[in-house]
Amino acid sequence: MSGSQFNIALIGLGVMGQRMLANMTTHGGYNLIAAWDPNPSACEQTHASYPSLRIAADADDAITDPRAEVVYIASPPAVHKQYAMSAIEHGKTVFCEKPLGVDVEQSRQLVAYAESSGVINAVNFSFAAKAASERIKDALDEGAVGRVVGVDVRLHFCRWPRDWQAGATWLAKRDQGGFVREVLSHYVYLTQRLFGRSTLGNAVVRYPDDGESAETHVLANLDCGRIPVSVAGGTGGVGPDRVEYTIWGTEVSYRLYDWNRLESSSGGDWVNELTQLDNPRQEGYMRMLDNLHALLRGDPHTMPSFRDALSVQEIIEGILASDGKRVAPDRRMY
């Protein structure tokens, strides 16, 4: 592939699909040519907003559109493999939302197939390109942080799914949803990007008694190159949500919160970083799309591959399946 614009077919027109539509349009490096969602109302609304975008008859119709170079998948995760395999079979680049899937063995099969095909593949982890994660990585590479003595991940959501996710009812169910898959996976990816492969030590997960609803609380410990990573998350109550990732260094510590805000401390109060960015969230979207564009051109980039996403999924599904006992690491992929 080459050129200033790449032709995109989209599968899934929920919140993430709509965000991608809007941001790819704003970016200018992408040409949105076909889209499909199983919800007819979502298709109708999308066509009203983007009249030039062809609404496909079904997923295969979008994937096999001869103009499409890249298939972007924003469906619920249980069908990611199905759509990705179809796209690969037709020689299309695949850009997929995380998680890669919910069944680890199926995702291993998908990774093997994608790699054997030679098709370009990438997964949308937001910290692949955010200014905050780049600032932290630079500080680590320069040695400014000193020795990292630990990492803390703290998550709390008063309502799950969050209000803006109300239409995605699957997020409330344990078979595909939950905040561990939806949110914690981003921070497991970030940890592995910064410090290398992680292994799961132990985890305790609390579920409602109905047998269907997603987790309400989680405690977990990871080991990442001898750096201890502690995870604590929950739902319920009243108050602001908490999404916080802290790296404790002997020289400088970093606190990443609310996804895009970054503070540092060398022993005193936290000091705001990235003050030059008026809208770090939108900046993050554009940086991600810049990196995807670089990947498609064959240039240096920071986009995670299917294999990167699989290593995150193995940890996430290990947490969700844990009964509090220590989990033996699976070395098959390493």
Image (cartoon, rainbow, N blue to C red):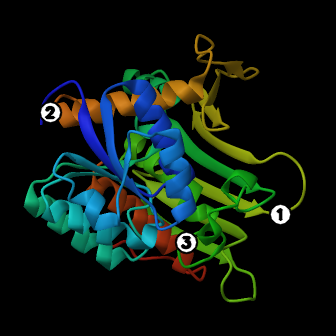
Kind of residue indicated by mark 3? Asn
Which dot, 3 or 1, sits closer to the camera? 1
Q: For the residue labelled by badge 2, is the local secondary structure a helix, a strand or a loop?
A: loop
Left or right of 99? Residue 179 is right
Q: Which of 118 and 324 is in front in this view?
A: 118
User: Mark 2 or mark 3, which has the lower sequence index?
Assistant: 3
Q: Mark 1 points at which residue?
A: 236
What's under tag 2, amino acid-wise? Gly
| Location of residue 8 with respect to 111 vertically, above or below | above
Identified at 35% across, 67% down, the residue is 58
Query: At x 46% / y 39%, what residue is drawn?
Result: 50
Q: How far apart are marks 3 and 1 (CA)?
A: 24 Å
Q: Is residue 289 above or below residue 164?
A: above
Tell me where residue 240 sits by quadrant: top right
Q: Is residue 269 left or right of residue 11?
A: right
For discs 1 and 2, the disc positioned in front in the rendered view: 2
Residue 13 visible here: yes
Disc 1 from disc 2: Cα separation: 45 Å
Q: Distance between the residues labelled 2 and 3?
A: 40 Å
Tell me the residue that label 3 is attached to.
Answer: 202
Q: In which quarter of the image is the N terminus?
A: top left
